[in-house]
Image: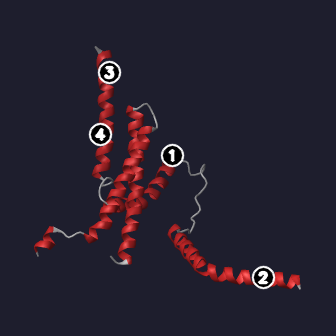
Amino acid sequence: MSEKELGKKLDRCLADGVVKLGTGLGLGIVFSVLFFKRRTWPITLFSGAGLGMAYANCQHDLRSHYLLHTSEQEQ
Amino acid sequence: MASRIWPLVKLVSKVTIAGGAVYVTYDSGLLGSSEQGSVVLEKAKVAVPPALEEWIKYFGLEAQLPTMPKIEFSPINSWNTGVRWTISSLSEAPTRASEYTSQGLQYVKDLIK
């Protein structure tokens, strides 16, 4: 993987992390207000889940360069 | 009869709102891959400031809120500058440390003389 490609992937990881954290926060607030009497733990849970999803996406993105796909293997 | 139905109506409306929120986030690509997330972030960066200005104009808050000064600040450039400065300082640190040490020793020797 070239340095430029790595840089772009890391930028995408950061952007994705921000988006998923914000989404988790928003959904956590919605669920906390509607179902859990404005407690804090749903907000924390959903934000953490968003961050975890971003981490998993980033991990997959960084590993994808080294994975051999079935179509390439057949060739 | 109404007292029995009302909690059910409340529950159904809450589930509808929560389900709608989850569906909207899924449909807009916020829960998808990294590429989709960065595309959504770019769209939001473009769409949010004009939308904010419109809302401020609509509610007539222009006179009340101070105008935001347009600051030419790039966090990416500042971060990169900081990284370069840190690494160059670290690479020059041994040379500078030996220089200052020798200067300090020379100063002490001159004092002793």
**Which residue was labeled with disc 4?**
B19
Label 3 marks which chain's residue?
A: B
CA distance for labels 4 and 2: 73 Å
Residue type of the residue flagged with mark 1 = Phe
- Position of the C terminus of chain B, as image quadrant, is bottom right
CA distance for labels 3 and 4: 20 Å
CA distance for labels 2 and 1: 70 Å
Q: Nearer the viewer, mark 4 or mark 2?
A: 2
Residue type of the residue flagged with mark 4 = Gly
Dot 4: what SS? helix
Q: Which mark is residue B105?
A: 2
Residue at the far top in the pictured view: B1
**Which residue was labeled with disc 3?**
B6
Q: Nearer the viewer, mark 2 or mark 1?
A: 2
Q: Nearer the viewer, mark 1 or mark 4?
A: 4
Foreground residue among B67 and A39: A39
Q: Residues within 10 Å of mark 4 (few under 14, many from 20)?
A: few
Residue B99: give x, y in percent of width and height.
70, 84
Q: Earlier in the sequence, mark 2 or mark 3?
A: 3
